[in-house]
Image (tube, helix red, strand yellow):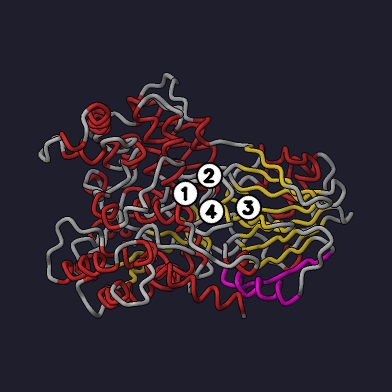
Amino acid sequence: MCGFAALFEVGRRFAPELLAGIDTDLYHRGPDSGGRLSEDGVALVIRRLAILDPSEAANQPMTDNEGRCTLVFNGEIYNFASLRRELEARGASFSTTGDSEVLLQGYLEWGEGVLDRLEGMYAFVIVDRARGVAVAARDPFGIKPLYLLRRGPVVALASEMRPLTRLVPPEADPAALAELLTFGWAAGRMSNLKGIERVPGGTVLKISLAEGSVQERRYFDVLDTLDPDRTLSRDEAIEQVSVALRDSVRAHLASDVGYTVQLSGGVDSSLVAALASAETPGRLASFSVNLGASVHDERRYREPVVQRYGLDHHEVPISGVEFAGALPRAVRHMEGPVPHGGCVMLMLLCERIRQVSKVVLTGEGADEMFGGYERYARWRKLSWQETVGRWLPASMAPPVWPFKGVRRLAGRDAAAAASLYRDPGPMHRLFPGLVPGPGARERASARFADFRDRLLAVDQTAYLESLLVRQDKMAMAASVEARVPYVHLPLLRLVNRLPRELRVPGRVTKPLLKAIAERHLPRDLIHRRKVGLLLPYDDWMADPAALGRYLDLLTAPSCRLADFTDRRRLSRVVDAFRDGRRAGLPAMFDLVNVELWLRSLASEEVRCAA
């Protein structure tokens, strides 16, 4: 919906030039309108993507009639209509029809208690002059990003890091870089940059306007809902989840400017399309990435869904050359290496969607809610490998099945490492100083005893946030709001209480969701191997017109990754890839991806200096 920045320093009046620069940084997140507030000690900048009540009356910053509180807000409150009715019954009056004023009035009525009533995706800052504080919060899942900078007397928050780098030069965080090279995503509070942290989902901050101090409180922890002791039959579980999912999709359709759906051809997005079409008057518009003749393209699975529901469907062809051309732009908007190559596809897809609508529903989050990855099908094997790896040193495990997995997981938390699709050994050997230690993934895993709960805990925190942030930033790069019906608080509360045997029985993935999908989708779409927007990276890396154009960056004197390894060794890795000797090499796309991000920091330094 928007992008904002909030700056605080006791007694300081922030320069208009600084605020104008921040406005420029955030413009892509909200081209419909912009607003600023500047007073002693406080500055707010916002760009608005108008979706609910697109009138000027709903623009921000938004201040109540008494002048007590001023709000900047990014996101959507899906239960705003019921909250509005409750507030009106308590005497509140409204001059707009959207959710921003409901959030503001809710705070005036309930204070921070409003957070316990919200259902949606959001990050916001409210300057409360009566209490002498600014209150900032991020939604429980972290669907909407929020970054925090504390430097000397300055405290600043923003929807993206770029505005904050006008206050502190951008510098790669080595601890984050280690996780980026291994997992593709730095989990927990790490933002990728030194001095800037990611505010955890479900966190509220209070900033003293008189002192500049910051207090932090976790108002909601999604893992507190992971308590699968509820006794439900399979039929009861299917029925309850089906109702909750339908209600979530309906809630996510709230828009005064229309909506569309991303359609991959997989179960998750296809089910969203089916449920959304039932609630949509007329034809629902859908959009898909088309990979042409690639074996990874799923058009044959999309077509039956398009035909069954009469979708107004659009195929967006994207080639390896187009992917390569857009990669640096995607890295810039991601403010880090893209955590999944599909980020580029999503950005290009949303650029096409923007010609039709500002809103798109996606199937993101279903795998983390319902156990959709292969690791859930083979959780028993992973648990066994972890157990064996605790007492059998990796060097003693033979390099044959079934001990290969033991060698790879030896000494590691298997639930935390399960999202690794490649052996991290080659990357760690190339960058021995950038091997990540235990972090947010391991802490989430350690909270639970059952291996299935541990997998879900890691995925619902670390892995899911990487997907949510990519959806936000890639869509917002095109001024489009991405919505995620599977990642909805009422649905989470239900799903995380389901019996493990129904949710993650092993050998199959997301059986409950597939059972629901059978009511709406063809069986051959549902019961097939998951693809998940796989891309032919090695083929594109071998093509000089595609990703191969970036290989020379890894051997150039200006190579940034060479600062973290032996330059000659890195060159030998590139030469081996070019010669077709690819066994035992780190993923070349991952190296290029990180190199492009490190190089982008130099241009950010120039921008900030200017």
Side (left or right) of 160 relative to 534? right
Q: Which residue is mark 2?
A: 141
Side (left or right) of 510 relative to 443? left
Q: Which residue is mark 4?
A: 253
Q: Which residue appears at 41% of the width and 46% of the height?
A: 463
Circles 1, 2 touching at the beta carbon (< 8 Å): yes
**Relative to 560, is 175 above or below?**
above
Which comes sooner in the sequence, label 3 or label 2?
3
Q: Which residue is mark 1?
A: 465
Circles 3, 4 touching at the beta carbon (< 8 Å): no
Say which amino acid is labelled 2: Phe
Circles 4, 2 touching at the beta carbon (< 8 Å): no
Circles 3, 2 touching at the beta carbon (< 8 Å): no
Which comes sooner in the sequence, label 3 or label 1?
3
Q: Position of residue 199 (x, y in %)?
A: 59, 49
| Residue count near mark 3 (Cα–Cα under 10 Å), binned few <14, some 14–19, many ≥20 | many
| Magenta-tinted stretch | 16-39
| Residue count near mark 2 (Cα–Cα under 10 Å), binned few <14, some 14–19, many ≥20 | many
Say which amino acid is labelled 4: Leu
